[in-house]
Image (tube, grey):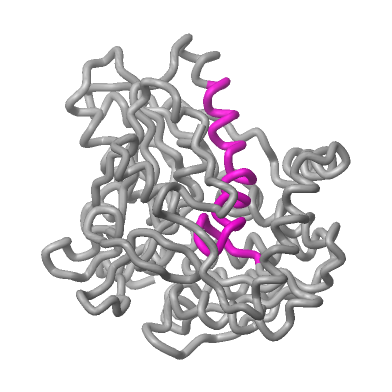
Amino acid sequence: MSLPDEHGKFIEYGGKFAPEVLMPAIEELERGFRRYVKDPGFRRDLGYYLEEFAGRPTPLYYAENLSKKVGGAKIYLKREDLVHGGAHKLNNTLGQALLAKKMGKERVIAETGAGQHGVATAIAAAALDLDCEVYMGTDDMERQKLNVFRMDLMNAEIIPVESGSCTLKDAINEAMRDWLANVETTHYLIGSIVGPHPYPLMVREFQRIIGEETRKQIIDKEGVLPDYIVACVGGGSNAIGIFHEFLGDEVGLVGVEAGGRGIESGEHGATLCAGTSGVLHGTCSKLLQDRYGQIKISYSIAAGLDYPGVGPELSYLAEKGRLEVTSVTDDEALEAFKLLSREEGIVPALESAHAVYHAVELGEELDEDKTIIVNLSGRGDKDVSVVAEALGVKL
């Protein structure tokens, strides 16, 4: 089991790097999380919302057509795309929103790139009667118009961010400034395993239900654990959510990052593949940065993978050799997007399509008695217009 120490560090990664004025709020959050995460009443309430509202457990689906097409290993899909809202994000937002309510907060703020975390935050806030504001880069707002409208429908206020690269990194910067000014009434609902401790630990704990369900389901279906589990990696919450339950087993864990236009081009979001150690958004982890420590602009056709950092626990696991990392380009992700849609009638999020592509490549190399599980972290409705434009199709 992978746990941070009392300072929230996974050896050199993690920790609390935040302004002194923000430390009381971070420490209050840590106390609240440690208190409620083991509280039977909190667990019961969260279980109710996850099952009755979010739709858990999600199926582990044998992708028979895709497996036959590949001609090698069996490929299973953990259907997080079927969670209410269309992605795994709601597992975490329900947990944090319920925690915020228990701690007496009236308002939640969030950042979003692909829009899925923003939608999930808006959903959780509406269900739990909390005010909600979501920061989103203007570039991401343009390519994720559907999710912007969905958030607006659920009474969340969307705040455009026009600074920097106008994407996820800059949205996080603005959300942190807001939290700094409103710590008494506001909970900052971070969407991934990033940020100062206890966020990476807290988000992992709310997402690990994915792996817990998967373990039971694959044993029920196959009688043994899988040979490989594959998940896309942006910040990394869906990945650690499914990986964590299998860290002590002989199961290959593969994180697939955004190769963008190719690693050699410099236009990518492959932090674990090409990054170096540094501090961003309150935590020490692998980053895309220049030799002077200035953060580089990341790029991916998948807005949720367009982030120049990654969760500290994944950096630790990759450095330790427990996590294999690779990258998939925009063109390859588009190919997988079409392939899964055509073969299985399942339209994946562009983020998830990165994992699908690698799983297909891996499956071709393995024998038919091997199994691969892909964490299908989200559905692709939000990406249809982006994909159509990339393929030259006019809607």
Relative horizontal placement of residue 342, taking residue 3 as reference (left or right): left
State the residue at coordinates (78%, 44%): 46
State the residue at coordinates (67%, 73%): 109
- The residue lying toward the viewer, choosing from 13 and 245, is 13
Taken as a whole, is the magenta stretch helix, strand or loop?
helix
Q: Name the spot of residue 272 as percent of width and height, x first.
A: 29, 54
State the residue at coordinates (73%, 52%): 33
Relative horizontal placement of residue 153, taking residue 145 as reference (left or right): right
Q: Name the spot of residue 333 as percent of width and height, x first.
A: 28, 53
Relative to 287, is 257 above or below? Answer: above
Q: Name the spot of residue 246 as percent of width and height, x first.
A: 46, 28
- The residue lying toward the viewer, choosing from 87 and 322, is 322
The residue furthest bottom is 162
The residue furthest top is 223
**Quick one: quadrant of the C terminus?**
bottom left
Relative to 85, is 211 above or below? Answer: above
Residue 214 among those drawn in magenta: yes
Relative to 24, is 227 above or below? Answer: above
Q: Name the spot of residue 273 as percent of width and height, x first.
A: 24, 54
Relative horizontal placement of residue 189, taking residue 46 as reference (left or right): left
Q: How many marks?
A: 0
Give residue 187's quadrant in the image: bottom right
Relative to 180, is 341 above or below? Answer: above
- The residue lying toward the viewer, choosing from 277 and 189, is 277
Give residue 168's quadrant in the image: bottom left
State the residue at coordinates (31%, 26%): 67
Magenta stretch in the rendered image: 189-217
